[in-house]
Every structure is written in C-alpha cells, then in structure tokens.
Image (cartoon, rainbow, N blue to C red):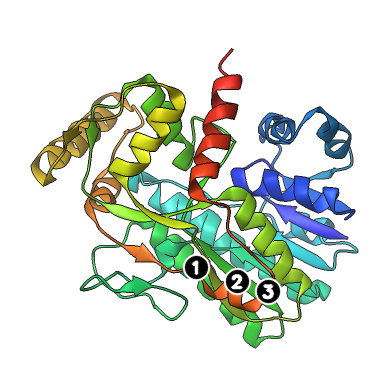
Amino acid sequence: MILVTGGTGLVGAHLLYHLILGGEKVRALKRTSSNTKITRFVFDFYGSEAWHLFDKIEWIEGDLLDYESLELALANIKTVYHTAALVSFNPSLKDRMMEVNEEGTANLVNACLEKGVDKFCYVSSIATLGNSKNGETIDEFSYWQGGKDHSAYSLSKFRAEMQVWRATKEGLNAIVVNPSVILGPGNWDQGSLKIINTVYKGLYFYTSGTTGFVDVRDVVKGMIKLVDSNIVNERFVLNGANLSFRLLFTQIAQMLQVKPPKIRAGKQLVGMAWRYEWLKNILFGIEPLITKDSARASLKTTHFSGEMISKTVDFKYTPIEDTIKDTTQYFLETQQ
C-alpha cells in the first residue's frame, strides 16, 4: 500500500489520481482542518469518470508534527510519497515553514525508518539548488550556496531535503525530485497558480526574469516512474521549459483571451511594490501579493536542465504550450 502526504495540495492531488488510475491502493494523510474539495476539483479535470477513482482514496487524519499519527498512517505501508509542505514567500511565516517543512519531514523519515518502508519519494524544489552564475544552467550537480539571497521557503526546503539525505545514510531508500515552477489545474488562489488568476484579472507589468516551468502531470508521472525503478538515493531536476516571465504571461493571456502585460517593471518599481505590500501587511495584516523574496526572484535569469530523468527512465515532458493550454482551458471552464 502507498501513503501520500499533501493529498489536498497541487502535486499530491494529481499524484493520487495517477496512482489510483494505475491500480494502486492509496492512503492519503490529511490534517483535520484540510479540505478534500481541491482534490475533487483536480480529479474532475480528468473527466467525469474520475469520480469513482476519488472514492478509492483511504483518507487518514494526521499531522507531520504529530509523530504518533504518522506511525498509525504508516501501518502496512511500503511506499511513501511526501508532497506536503508549507509554501510561501512571506518572511513572517519563516518559523512555521521551518517547523512544517524541516521538522515535519524529519518526523516522517524517522517513522519510515522505524516502520521499514521500502521506498520514499520526496518532492523538494529547485529552490534548494545553487544560484546561476554567469548564465550557467542549474542541474542535479548544482549545490546549495550560503548567503542572504535565499528565501525562508528555500531554506526550509533545503533543510527538509537534508533530513531525507540523512535518512538514506540510516537505511532509507529515497528518491528526491526538484521541480521548477509547477503549472497545472488546482487551487487558482494558491502558489504558482495565482499567475493564471492574476493575468485573467488584468496584469499590466512584467519583469525581466527567466525561470523554469514544469507540468504537474509530468512531476507526478516522473515520480511514479522513478519509484517503480531500481534507482535509489538520487535526485532529479524536473523542468519542462525555461521561459521569461514576459513570454509566460503573454502565452497565458492569449489563451485566456485577455490583454498581456505591456509595461516592463525594473528593479526600482519592483522594489516599491514589495515595500508597499509589506506595509499593508504590517498595518492591516493583508497577505502580501509580492514580497522582497518573490520580487528578487522575478528579476533573476536562471536556466534549469531537467534532462537527466529522460536519460534514466522512459520519460518525456509535455510541451509547455500544451500545459498552458490545458490549464487555462480548465480555468475558464471553472469560472462559471
């Protein structure tokens, strides 16, 4: 039997669908406060016939910070996919991200070692890899570099990843995947999918940065193929394409049939924007639309290589144009 954490999140929900479609028996860990509505929403993307697959999920309540609940969730489990994480560029959530992402992952890998889990797959992030210097491409052999340029989120994911690598030294067979910015149907108000909603409502500015993007379906299919292989204790970057933010926003806008952004926001304008959002957060407690960390990321030009997985297992990326088309089409269908 397989355990999936984060089954109400973007990657976890799509993963549950593909695992059950493949005939696997799946248990999904969820907190008491979590809602499975988004998981149903994702299943619906795959067609009305997917509803009967959703009913095959065995939900179990638990928390990454509650070790006893993890022990119960791992009963008779041989494979674990750890997709759960707190994702935010908001620096005020640093302590909470460290707690959930690092301490929670440490608890889970420790429980997996105790229960004798056969294989563990961890969804990390490109945020844990090195910064691009002189235009070099980031891949599996790029490593974390110290300094002030890392967000609280990237630090929390790096430390969580270190817990996984530590567990491999203690006998856990693990696979780590480092996806770039993930696109695909999910909660339009959270994470990277806010891009779709923002462009739809009207986005006037773009920044000069470039980064990597990957289809959520590719992320989960890659994870499954790697777990089903004999490969252990290796990492794989998952990146379908490197795009400038301007090109991404333009392609999304074209699919949504709205106007693309025309005004280039330089360092000064972006700096003013994140400071304004920071002030609103301080004075009124409003969640910032842009933070110092996300502003810095939007101006960086970084290229990633996700080629190694295709050289290792039978795997092919979805063209990013198809990803944008499928995602925006579902977005429009669900705005009724």
Task: Check disc 1 and give the amino acid type.
Answer: Gly
Relative to 290, is 64 above or below? below
Relative depth, front residue between 334 and 243: 243
For the residues labelled 2 and 3, say whether their Cβ atoms are less than 8 Å apart.
yes
Measured as percent of width and height from the top left, residue 90 is found at: 35, 44
Please give left or right for residue 304 compared with residue 184 in the image: left
Q: Which mark is residue 313?
A: 3
Task: Check disc 3 and give the amino acid type.
Answer: Val
Distance from Cα at disc 2 to Cα at disc 3? 6 Å
Label 1 environment density (alpha carbons within 10 Å; few <14, some 14–19, many ≥20): many
Name the residue rendered at 13%, 36% in the picture: 272
Distance from Cα at disc 1 to Cα at disc 2? 8 Å
Q: Indicate the quadrant containing the C terminus: top left, top right, bottom left or bottom right.
A: top right
Q: Indicate the quadrant containing the N terminus: top left, top right, bottom left or bottom right.
A: bottom right
Measured as percent of width and height from the top left, residue 165 is found at: 57, 79
Please give left or right for residue 297 compared with residue 59 in the image: left
For the residues labelled 1 and 2, say whether their Cβ atoms are less than 8 Å apart.
yes
Task: Check disc 2 and give the amino acid type.
Answer: Ser
Badge 3 element: loop
Residue holding disc 1: 306
Q: Which of the 4 quarters of the picture holds residue 196?
A: top left
